[in-house]
Image (cartoon, rainbow, N blue to C red):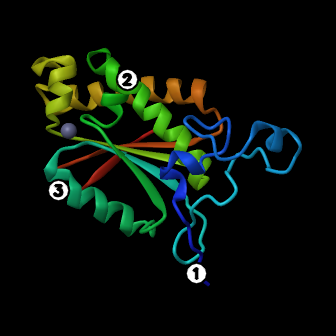
Amino acid sequence: MMTTQTHGFSCACCLPAGFPGGKGVSRRAVLAGLVAAPLLIPGAVRAADGAVFDSMLLSCIDPRMVTPVGDYMFGRGLRGKFSQFVIAGAAIGVVAPQFASWQPAFWDNLGTSIKLHGITRLIAIDHRDCGAAKIAYGEGAVATRALETETHQKAATAFRAEMTKRQPTMKLEIGLMALDGGIEMFV
Ligand SMILES: [Zn+2]
């Protein structure tokens, strides 16, 4: 079965009241129970095959990582089932003080994907030889493989703490990918 969306929720006129920028449905209608006040907005987009969406991917802008990160997600059977937020440094981009001005955009987008797509998991994939890690913490922080691992581990820990505070029910996986696509997961 095909479903048709006129504007989708990218258009402010279709956003329910109470949703940032939205004015399409009155608050009175929401309060009257005419419109469910939802975790997932009624009419939110679905996968083409009707499947429930699963995750948001958080990955780095590095062009070398586009293919291996995609291969990793597809290899897990998540093709077409994840939203994606791309930011320099991935998890580092979301927690490093150097990039503080970017960070509200991530949290707002995560909240939007929860509402629109019903995602329940965030998969963050940092990577080795990441230029953003050097900008954020200095060359010395990634000077050896061990230091690089430690730097990403610290960012992962900070990211997990922030996620727990902001979206406590969100499942979180954080990995560090090598340029060849091999991945180690932080726990
Ligand atoms: Zn990077």
Q: Which of marks 3 and 2 is in front?
A: 2
Instruction: List x then y, in percent, for residue 161.
Output: 52, 24
In this view, the residue farthest toward the bottom is: 1
Q: Is mark 3 on a helix, strand or loop?
A: loop
Q: Residue at x 65, y 38 (%)?
A: 169
Q: Mark 3 points at which residue?
A: 180
In this view, the residue farthest toward the top is: 97
Res 79 → quadrant: bottom left
Q: Mark 1 points at which residue?
A: 2
Q: Which of 163 and 150 lies nearest the eye of the viewer?
A: 163
Q: Is residue 167 visible?
A: yes
Res 167 → quadrant: top right
Q: Which residue is drawn at 53% across and 47% down?
A: 113
Instruction: List x then y, in percent, for residue 38.
Output: 74, 46
**Residue type, numbered disc 3:** Asp
Q: Which of 114 and 136 lies nearest the eye of the viewer?
A: 114
Q: Which of marks 3 and 1 is nearer the N terminus?
A: 1
Q: State the CA–CA distance, disc 1 to disc 2.
A: 40 Å
Q: What element carries label 2?
A: helix
Rendered image: mark on residue 95: 2
Q: Which of marks 3 and 1 is in front?
A: 1
Q: How crowded is mark 3: few (under 14 residues within 10 Å), some or many (20 or more)?
A: few
Q: Can residue 120 be seen in this view?
A: no
**Residue type, numbered disc 2:** Val
Which quadrant of the figure shows ligand 1?
Answer: top left
Res 20 → quadrant: top right
Q: Which residue is drawn at 17% across and 45% down?
A: 62
In the shown orientation, is residue 31 left or right of residue 86? Answer: right
In contact (CB < 8 Å): disc 1 and disc 2: no
Q: State the CA–CA distance, disc 3 to disc 1.
A: 39 Å
